[in-house]
Amino acid sequence: MAVTLCPLCSGASTTPFSEDRRRPYRRCPRCALVFVPPLWRPTPAAERAEYDRHENRLDDPGYRRFLARLATPLLAALPPAQAGLDFGCGPGPALAAMLGEAGHRVALYDPFYAPDPAALALGGRDFITATEVVEHLHQPGLELARLWARLRVGGVLGIMTKHLRSRAAFDRWHYKNDPTHVCFFSRATWRWWAAGRRARLVFVADDALLLHKLGG
């Protein structure tokens, strides 16, 4: 039987976690990530078709309230006039607009809607945001490491994603039914990830967290 490596930590001892009529799910005992094996992940074309159905407008008050769960604590943590990156901004980069209205400069990157390699390559960022993004990543270990490398010491990585709570809750969880959601993080997963980078981790909402990049 082929070994199914964890896409976050590359652990080889992943085990079956759950299965529904769409696909199976595995769990990594090292980092606690639950993920969809590669064979059942969507193609880029299928991903794009699903994303094109989303209607997240810049001026939608409800969407802005949703994003404020990350934006408000992030803004409180940032000095004035910082330079950042909104990773996975989508077709309607409302969070970038909100941060820009607060006086910050925000570059955009999205593999489908803002595929600007220069924005992704630039280092020394004061902050990076990824809202409702990490659950879509097929290679979260590589992508998160790349984002972390783009942050300066003292910078902040802000993440929004719904957190897996238990095996029983997972089976009833609507979040897993989106075919583009292939990685499911828990608070334990983020604690593992932060510890490996000596980052200061702050959970600022049920589905939002800040990772502060420390020096030394």
Image (spheres, rainbow, N blue to C red):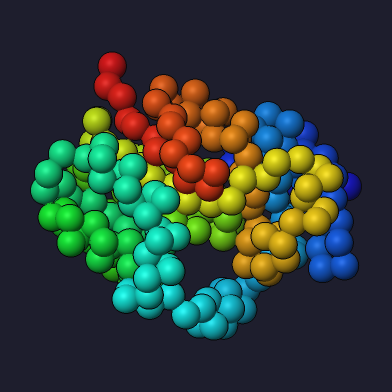
Q: Tell me the quarter of the picture where residue 75 sits.
A: top left
x 77%, y 50%: residue: 170
- Residue 63 placement: quadrant: bottom left
x, y (%) of residue 172?
A: 80, 56
Q: Is 128 drawn above or below residue 182 in the view shown?
A: above
Measured from the top left, where is residue 79 in percent x and y? 15, 39
- Residue 75, above or below 111: above
Tell me if residue 193 comes above or below residue 19 in the rendering.
above
- Is residue 47 shown left or right of residue 30? left
For the point 33% across and 42% down, the residue is 73
Q: Residue at x 15, y 47 (%)?
A: 82
Q: Nearer the viewer, residue 94 or 33?
A: 94
Q: Nearer the viewer, residue 1 or 99?
A: 99
Residue 157, x across and y down, in percent: 36, 42
Looking at the rendered image, the quarter that the C terminus falls into is: top left
Instruction: From the viewer's perspective, tell me whether residue 77 is left or right of residue 15.
Output: left
Q: Nearer the viewer, residue 121 or 181?
A: 181
* Residue 54 seen in the current view: yes
Q: Is residue 177 left or right of residue 83?
A: right
Horizontal and vertical percent position of residue 189: 60, 35
Closer to the camera in the image, 212 or 100: 100
Q: How many numbered callouts?
A: 0
